[in-house]
Amino acid sequence: MALALLTGCGKATSPDRAVAEGMADWIKYSYSLSGSGNTNKISVSYQVPELSRNIAPLFDTNWMHKNGENPSEDQDSPNKDAVISGTTTVADALQQCLRNYKDASCTLFYATDVTECAGFTSPEVTQLLTQSNPIAVYGNYNTAVENATHLRIAAAHKTIGEQTFLLAVVIMEK
């Protein structure tokens, strides 16, 4: 019995779920600050299966801004205009993968290179939310922030060569 207490009997949280929970805490806190206009009690779910099932397998380094590509854009952010196959852009692929959420107030896709802080949840969440510019796949971010009552959040890590990327989807619903 003592051994069971020491080893734990509950389900361990995966690194991806820990990041999603950290994002939810950060987002809910930022919405609660004066000026955002959102005084709603916001519920959260961590189910966006399209991220790991459809988006992560497609994701590659060519989805990210390249040095010198557009100096005004953050280099550690996804590039919605990058062509990933034939004439299909990152934005097109994301809209196809996330089409089930087109009626949500806002659907965002984040991606950032977390190679330097991989495995450390707080630095990964901070980098993702403060240094990466998300792609608005559907909806209006400003209106969604003011009216959101529910968030769907998922995160996934993807390693490509020597780089580890953190991918996330945030869906704001009213």
Image (cartoon, rainbow, N blue to C red):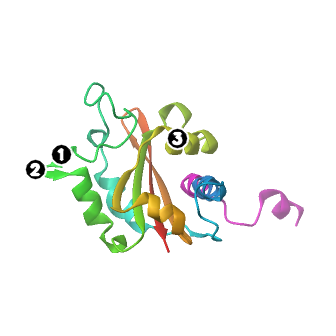
Amino acid under label 3? Answer: Thr
Identified at 25% across, 30% down, the residue is: 69
Residue ID for mark 2: 86
Horizontal side of 141 relative to 46 (left or right) equals left
Amino acid under label 1? Answer: Val
Residue segment shown in magenta: 1-20
Q: Secondary structure at mark 1?
A: strand
Amino acid under label 2? Answer: Gly
Residue ID for mark 3: 130
Please tell me which residue lies in front, 11 or 168.
168
Q: CA distance from mark 3 to mark 1?
A: 25 Å
Identified at 27% across, 31% down, the residue is: 70
Please tell me which residue lies in front, 58 or 75.
75
Q: Do labels 2 and 3 touch, CB within 8 Å?
A: no
Q: Main secondary structure of the magenta part?
A: helix
Q: Do labels 1 and 2 touch, CB within 8 Å?
A: yes
Query: Counting residues from the N terminus, which is met first, the one under dot 2 or under dot 3?
Result: 2
Identified at 33% across, 66% down, the residue is: 98
Q: Is residue 59 magenta?
A: no
Name above or below for residue 15 compared with residue 174.
Answer: above
Residue ID for mark 1: 83
Query: Counting residues from the N terminus, which is met first, the one under dot 3 or under dot 1?
Result: 1
